[in-house]
Image (cartoon, rainbow, N blue to C red):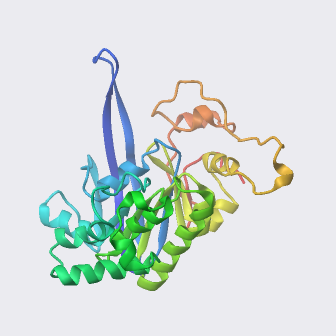
Amino acid sequence: MQEILSVKDLRKYFIKKGFTGTDKETVRVADGVSFSIKDAETFVLAGESGSGKTTIARIILGALEQDAGTITFLGQEITSQADSLKKIRLGCQMVHQDPYASINPRMTILDIVKESLEIHNIGNKEERNHIALHALSQVKLEPVEDIASKYPHMLSGGQRQRVAIARAIVTNPKLVIADEPVSMLDVSVRIGILELIKELQEKHGISFLYITHDLSTAGYIGHRIAILYRGKIVETGPINEVLSTPHHPYTQALLDSIAEPDPNNLHSDRKIRINESSGVETYQGCRFMAKCPYAIEKCKQEPELEKISDARQVACFVRIN
């Protein structure tokens, strides 16, 4: 399979100041992150809020500049040069988490979807309208002409997210970054959006970078997964293998937090295998050590991602399961 995106040793640090302005802390939002995405593949980047997932997405799209590392899209390294950024912004689109805030409330649905066509000077006015209407039909917003004339406030949350997806695919991209695309939607409409993503991938061969904290939706839609904790990938591999036999304690903790759809377990206690933080978390040694119930003395050293099979890597000295 062709490699669509390659991220190597990506680093992004922020300086966090205290109330006085003198106390400073370096926050390592991305600290040596590497992964690749193949043609027509859904690669999942999973982790809790604040782990660095969205920052990595913004760096890929050129909204932020990395401190170190390389990003290669369709064989060309992406830099801060205008031509380089234009290539990735045409061939790589994004679907944001919030369908209420990510689209302009003052524009009609048709204008929202065809906006990127205008930015990239694709077609004339008539052609843009035709392409935008076709994109709306592909995301199953019908009757298309009626939807196209509406404003965002006239649509439901699920419909708005379908508009965001239509806007993302209208330029025929090779890669779509979906940042928590169903987390703000009603449970009843989430499956429809996930099915739509899978259908568009099968029909058009689009690759997806699916960003989430929810491993249940990740398992439904993904092919491979990387678990991110405080700017570091701690485990990666085929999604079914990682979710069925996690080797890193943090992966296990994420799995423990998934609600079980079984009414018999409604009042049962659930134990998440994670210790309360002691408040002494640092970037020395394993970053999960302060919360890990399996930590040993060696964890004071920083574990590197180690290959444990042809397709799996884990950064852990203990390796559960």
Q: Position of residue 80 (x, y in %)?
A: 17, 56
Total number of numbered labels? 0
Q: Give how far across and how far down residue 241 sits, in percent.
A: 65, 66
Q: Quadrant of the N terminus?
A: bottom left
Q: Nearer the viewer, residue 57 or 128?
A: 128
Q: Residue furthest right?
A: 264
**Res. 263 image quadrant:** bottom right
Name the spot of residue 315 as percent of width and height, x first.
Answer: 54, 50
Q: Looking at the image, which residue is at 31% across and 58% down?
A: 60
Residue at the top extreme, as displayed: 20
Q: Residue at x 49, y 72 (%)?
A: 197
x, y (%) of residue 108? 30, 65
Residue 222 visible within the image? no
Front-most of residues 283 and 182: 182
Residue that appears at 17% across and 68% down:
119
Looking at this view, is 311 or 202 the one in front? 202
Q: Residue at coordinates 28% horizontally, 18% vertically from top-left? A: 21
Image-based side of 241 in relation to 204, left or right: right
Quarter-wise, where is residue 96 in the image?
bottom left
- Is 26 situated above or below 134? above
Examine the image and state in which quarter residue 275 appears.
top right
Instruction: Answer yes or no: is residue 241 visible.
Output: yes
Q: Pick the quarter of the image with the C terminus.
A: bottom right
